[in-house]
């Protein structure tokens, strides 16, 4: 067994010593079988949340209404979730009521895909009633039970299918795929926040371009924020080689292939409820892509774009079907050789200006700072306080003569 599981074995042993069952479940077991690195070890148990709390001295009630208690063991947090069935679904969303049960098999049955419905005991034996292991070996994503039923219960599972497709480079089994296409409209009932969490994982996956194609092809895109008109564009995503792009760059890439101007791009990012700070960054990337599509970088544009210039260059490379890293090294050295990288690097302050010219504060200060900044970036002027003083006094004398 892997190190991460071995560390958690005492947690299972403690639960068992109290007379209950406990297993490793979910993504960690799947990733372990796949030979991938394991993120979080999740545990499922027959003990009710209150019972789990009596077994461990230190617990956190993070999701107790869903049956999850977090236990700290040797400083590592483990989510321990009581076996549950989700019998009652309303509105194609999460179950209206969670029912705790004592049977592992029933708990595995409510899980989304067969590859995610495998349990492992403390000795490393798998409990795999739906042959999830077979699906993993054959690289196949298929639902536990009938796809149409499972997607009708919780439509988010459709997004999850495509995000696992992107992350794992598996195929989506035919019946499951067909159900995506015929039930895409059920996504309408799902909160943007839940769609976003899956979509960002999709954008980070190795098969993301293929996954975007699936999103378009199945019509899922029609029920994703501000994506309804872009089926054709999504289906062409595979033509681009975006293997090296970051998730932020992927968002900017989408705004490009959808041909969104600044205000439409803003509306697109907002409709996904992305954090304001991130939207600002994405809009800046898109702004500099538009600039760069028409102009070459110079000291002044590089100074203003900062690190965003690299993001913009990489995305633009992908859009024009070049390797994303083309010209990046040169751009980095061009950026590194800028005489100043931000306003605070400039050897000139507002106080300097007021002292030198004996004038009170006002908009003239900003104008002088910008003028100086431009001259320093343009290589006309040395960035030293003394040269700047001479230069400015000289400029002003000339102005006075005119
Ligand atoms: P990741 O590695 O990205 O965390 P994961 O498979 O662990 O992938 P989680 O969202 O952490 O995904 O969910 C943990 C487990 O809970 C899943 O493996 C699956 O068994 C179950 N699960 C999660 N969401 C759903 C859902 N909407 N419907 C049914 N089962 C779900
Ligand atoms: Mg997980």
Image (cartoon, helix red, strand yellow):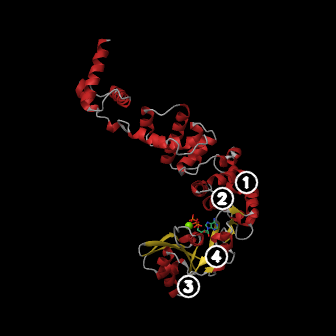
**Disc 4, SS:** helix
Q: Does residue 390 sit above or below 341 in this rendering?
A: above
Q: Between disc 1 and disc 3, whose residue precedes?
A: 3
Mark 4: give few (<14), some (14-19) or many (20+) Cα within 10 Å. many
Q: Which mark is residue 23?
A: none
Q: Please name the residue shown 64% across and 51% down the image.
A: 209
Q: Which residue is mark 1?
A: 218
CA separation in Å, label 2 and label 1: 10 Å
| Residue that numbered label 3 is attached to | 20
> Under tag 2, what secondary structure?
helix
Q: Is residue 54 visible?
A: no
**Marks 3/2: CA distance?**
36 Å
Q: Position of residue 103 (x, y in %)?
A: 64, 81
For the residues carrying marks 2 and 4, which lies nearer the camera in this image? 2
Q: Is residue 31 left or right of residue 393?
A: right
Judging from the image, what secondary structure is the residue with disc 1 in? helix
Rendered-image quadrant of the C terminus = top left
Q: From the viewer's perspective, is residue 127 above or below residue 345?
A: below
Say left or right for 60 vs 224: left
Secondary structure, mark 3, is loop
Residue marked by disc 2? 162
**Residue 110's image quarter?**
bottom right
Q: Is residue 217 above or below residue 290?
A: below
């Amino acid at each position: 067994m892997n190190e991460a599981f071995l560390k958690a074995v005492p947690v299972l042993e403690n639960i068992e010593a109290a007379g209950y069952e406990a297993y490793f479940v979910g993504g960690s077991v799947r990733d372990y079988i796949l030979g991938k690195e394991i993120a979080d070890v999740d545990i499922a148990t027959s003990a009710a949340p209150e019972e789990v709390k009596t077994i461990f001295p230190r617990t956190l009630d993070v999701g107790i209404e869903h049956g999850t208690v977090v236990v700290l063991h040797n400083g590592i947090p483990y989510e321990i979730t009581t076996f549950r069935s989700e019998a009652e679904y309303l509105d194609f969303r999460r179950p209206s009521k969670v029912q705790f049960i004592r049977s592992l098999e029933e708990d595995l049955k409510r899980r989304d895909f067969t590859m995610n419905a495998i349990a492992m005991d403390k000795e490393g034996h798998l409990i795999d009633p739906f042959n999830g292991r077979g699906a993993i070996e054959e690289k196949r994503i298929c639902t536990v039970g009938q796809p149409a039923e499972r997607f009708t219960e919780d439509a988010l599972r459709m997004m999850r299918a495509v995000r696992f497709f992107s992350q794992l480079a598996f195929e989506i089994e035919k019946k499951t795929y067909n159900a995506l296409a015929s039930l895409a409209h059920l996504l309408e009932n799902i909160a943007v926040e839940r769609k976003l969490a899956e979509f960002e994982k999709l954008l980070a996956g190795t098969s993301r371009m293929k996954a975007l194609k699936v999103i378009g092809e199945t019509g899922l895109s029609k029920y994703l924020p501000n994506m309804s008109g872009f089926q054709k564009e999504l289906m062409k995503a595979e033509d681009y080689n975006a293997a090296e792009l970051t998730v932020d760059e992927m968002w900017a890439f989408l705004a490009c292939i959808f041909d969104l101007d600044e205000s439409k791009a803003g509306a697109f990012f907002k409709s996904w409820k992305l954090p304001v700070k991130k939207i600002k960054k994405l809009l800046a990337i898109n702004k500099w892509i538009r600039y760069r599509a028409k102009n070459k970088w110079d000291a002044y544009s590089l100074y203003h774009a900062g690190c965003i210039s690299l993001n913009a260059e990489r995305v633009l490379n992908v859009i024009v079907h070049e390797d994303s890293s083309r010209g990046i090294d040169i751009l980095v050295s061009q950026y590194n050789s800028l005489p100043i990288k931000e306003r605070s690097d400039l050897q000139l302050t507002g106080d300097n200006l007021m002292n030198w010219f004996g004038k009170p504060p006002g908009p003239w200060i900003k104008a002088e700072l910008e003028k100086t900044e431009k001259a320093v970036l343009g290589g006309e002027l040395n960035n030293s306080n003394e040269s700047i003083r001479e230069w400015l006094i000289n400029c002003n004398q000339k102005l006075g003569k005119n």
